[in-house]
C-alpha cells in the first residue's frame, strides 16, 4: 500500500554549503524560534511540531518552523502526516564552530537572569 502523499512530500532545505551566518543569526534572533532550538538541543530525537507549546497561533508556529528550516537550523521531515524537526547541529558546528553552543549558553543564562531572584518583570 503506498504511503500518504504527505509522507513523500519533500521540504526544501539548504545544502550545508548554502547556509549563511546572517540567516542563522536572524532565525535565532526571535524568542519563539530560540525556544524551539533550545528544546531541540536538549534531546537526541526528532520532535513533532505539535510537541512544542508556543505562545502563538498555529499559522505563526508554522512560520517560525519555516524560518528555522530555510535558514538551515533545523531539518524537517514528514513521517506519515506528522512533521518532525531535528536540529542541524553537526552542519552548524562545521560551518560556524561554537556558535550554536554559545547562543544556547547565552540564552540559558538570560533565562536564568530574567526569572531568577531579583529579576524584574
Image: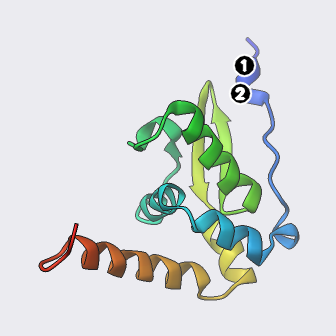
Residue 2 in the image, given as x and y percentages of width and height:
76, 15
Q: Are marks 1 and 2 in contact (CB under 8 Å)?
A: yes
Name the residue located 82 percent from the left edge and 46 percent from the top edge: 12
**Label drawn at residue 87:** none
Residue at image location 61% in from the left, 38% down from the top: 62
Residue 40 relative to residue 78: left or right: left
Element class at badge 1: loop
- The residue at 69%/53% (across/down) is 67
Mark whose residue sits in front, 1 or 2: 2
Residue position for label 2:
7
Would you place residue 6 above or below residue 19 in this image?
A: above
**The C terminus is located in which quarter?**
bottom left
Q: Residue 44 versus residue 120: which sits nearer the camera? A: 120
x then y, percent, for residue 46:
53, 49
Q: Secondary structure beneath disc 2?
A: helix
* Location of residue 1 with respect to 29 vertically, above or below: above
Amino acid at each position: 500500500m503506498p504511503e500518504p502523499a504527505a509522507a513523500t512530500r519533500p521540504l526544501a532545505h539548504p545544502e550545508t554549503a548554502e547556509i549563511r551566518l546572517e540567516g542563522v543569526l536572524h532565525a535565532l534572533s526571535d524568542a519563539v524560534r530560540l525556544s524551539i532550538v533550545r528544546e531541540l538541543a536538549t534531546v537526541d530525537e526528532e520532535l513533532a511540531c505539535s510537541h512544542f507549546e508556543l505562545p502563538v497561533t498555529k499559522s505563526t508556529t508554522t512560520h517560525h518552523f519555516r524560518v528555522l528550516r530555510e535558514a538551515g537550523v533545523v531539518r524537517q521531515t514528514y513521517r506519515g502526516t506528522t512533521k518532525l524537526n531535528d536540529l542541524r547541529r553537526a552542519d552548524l558546528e562545521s560551518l560556524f564552530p561554537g556558535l550554536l553552543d554559545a547562543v544556547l549558553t547565552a540564552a540559558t543564562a538570560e533565562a536564568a537572569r530574567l526569572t531568577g531572584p531579583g529579576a524584574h518583570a
